[in-house]
Image: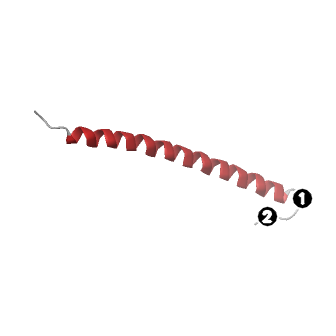
Amino acid sequence: MAVSGVGGTQTSDKSIDKMTEAFDKAIEKSAKITEITTEKKVALDAAKQRPNG
């Protein structure tokens, strides 16, 4: 909802842009963390399946 008045809409738009940017960065970092942890889990699972001895 845009705020009416002098500069109100611009302020709201800038706030929304900043929030969108923050969410985009968070999603990017989350995806990277998921990628790294998935790789480590695959490696761990593979190590567990190797015969001992």
- Within 10 Å of disc 1 (Cα), the crowding (few <14, some 14-19, many 20+) is few
Q: Callout 2, which amino acid?
A: Ala
Q: Is residue 32 left or right of residue 22?
A: left
Residue that badge 1 annotates: 6
Q: Quadrant of the C terminus?
A: top left
- Within 10 Å of disc 2 (Cα), the crowding (few <14, some 14-19, many 20+) is few
Q: Secondary structure at mark 2?
A: loop
Asked if residue 43 is positioned above or below residue 5 in the image, the reply reads above
Instruction: Give the image location of residue 8, x and y in percent.
Output: 83, 59
Considering depth in this image, is 29 or 42 the residue closer to the camera? 42
Mark 2 or 1: in front is: 2
Residue at left offset 55%, top offset 49%: 27
Residue at left offset 60%, top offset 45%: 25
Residue that badge 2 annotates: 2
Q: Tell which residue pokes out farthest to the top in this image.
A: 53
Instruction: Give the image location of residue 4, x and y in percent.
Output: 85, 65
Q: Secondary structure at mark 1?
A: loop
Q: Find residue 52 and report its image quarter.
A: top left
Q: Is residue 21 left or right of residue 52?
A: right
Considering depth in this image, is 46 or 21 the residue closer to the camera? 46
Q: Callout 1, which amino acid?
A: Val
